[in-house]
Amino acid sequence: MIGEEQQQTETVACSECFKPYEVPVFMVGTRKIRFDSTCDECADKEQKAYEEQMKRDEQAQRLAAFASLCPPLYQDTDPSRIYTPYVRAVEDWEFNPTGLILVGPAGKGKSRAAWMLIKRYILAGKRCFGVTATQLAKFAADQWHSRVEDRNKAEYVIQECKSCSILLLDDLGKQKFTERAELELFDILEYRTSHKKPTIATSNSDGKSFRQMLSEDRGEPILRRLQQFSTIIQYK
């Protein structure tokens, strides 16, 4: 019948290893159509090489994402210089609704340890975000900035703080929050705890000292959300 396809096979040489292998040949009338390039073994190798390259590219993109988020000082950290319980805590922590709070004096590696955890999960494909308490206060105020660019940036940061898989709040308790910043902190923590999203935090202040920096209305609810939904690692 005119136009009817007839399948045959031919022996050809693989373009990679040059070994002979069988390929299907379709005859459409007097026209021969043959699809060949590499043998199955070489095709499997090409596919595996492609998949490995994709993984390398993906990891490179994740490393770039971490580098754009993490302050340069904390990107390369020697764990041996960090207070050992902090290191153990961030290495042992597995993704779950209960976060971590690292508490202790300056210079003990709280921020470095927290960023180690964030790096691990960015490389694992989790959507992470991090800000300092000072930055959060600034972005809370900038939502009413006269410049559209500043307003948009502030709104983006606040939304990321709420919606990311893992949030790092660095240096809580370094300063007294404004009413606007305190309200945003409460909203972020309320959203995250109610949606079972973990928060990682660092602070120089213990619970009592941090509570004194907060208002009467929101201080206790903020502290309760931090304490009840976190494992606290205190420097001793």
Image (cartoon, rainbow, N blue to C red):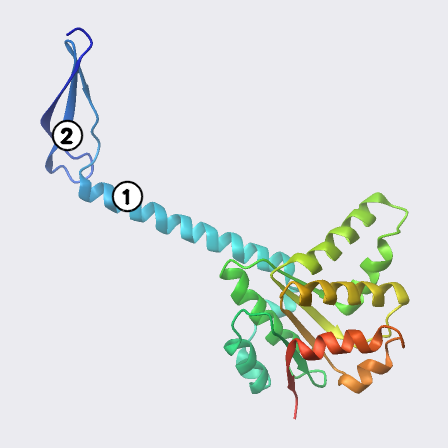
Quadrant the C terminus occupies? bottom right
| Residue 208 falls left or right of residue 53 | right
Residue indicated by mark 1: 46
Q: Residues within 10 Å of mark 2 (few under 14, many from 20)?
A: some
Residue 139 lies, in percent from the top left, at 81, 58
Question: Height in image: 9 above or below 219?
Answer: above
For label 1, the crowd category at 10 Å Cα-Cα, with few meaning under 14, some 14 to 19 and many 20 or more, is some
Disc 2 marks a residue whose amino acid type is Val
Judged left or right of residue 231, residue 151 is right
Question: In terms of depth relative to the viewer, which is nearer, 192 or 147?
Answer: 192
- Which residue lies most toward the front here? 194
Measured in 3D between alpha carbons, the distance from the residue under mark 2 to the one under mark 1, in whole angstroms, is 18 Å
Vertical comparison of 106 with 44: above or below: below
State which mark lies toward you, 2 or 1.
Answer: 2
- Residue 100: quadrant of the picture: bottom right
Is the Cβ of the residue at disc 2 closer than 8 Å to that at disc 1?
no
Q: Secondary structure at mark 1?
A: helix
Eyeballing the image, is 154 above or below 80? above
Residue that badge 2 annotates: 23
Residue 77 x %, y %: 57, 73
Farthest top residue in view: 2
Type of amino acid under label 1: Glu
Relative to 81, say whether 137 is above or below: above
Q: Is residue 53 left or right of residue 230?
A: left
Element at label 2: strand
* Residue at figure coordinates x 51%, y 72% from the top left: 94
Q: Is residue 95 left or right of residue 180?
A: left
Q: Residue at x 14, y 7 (%)?
A: 1
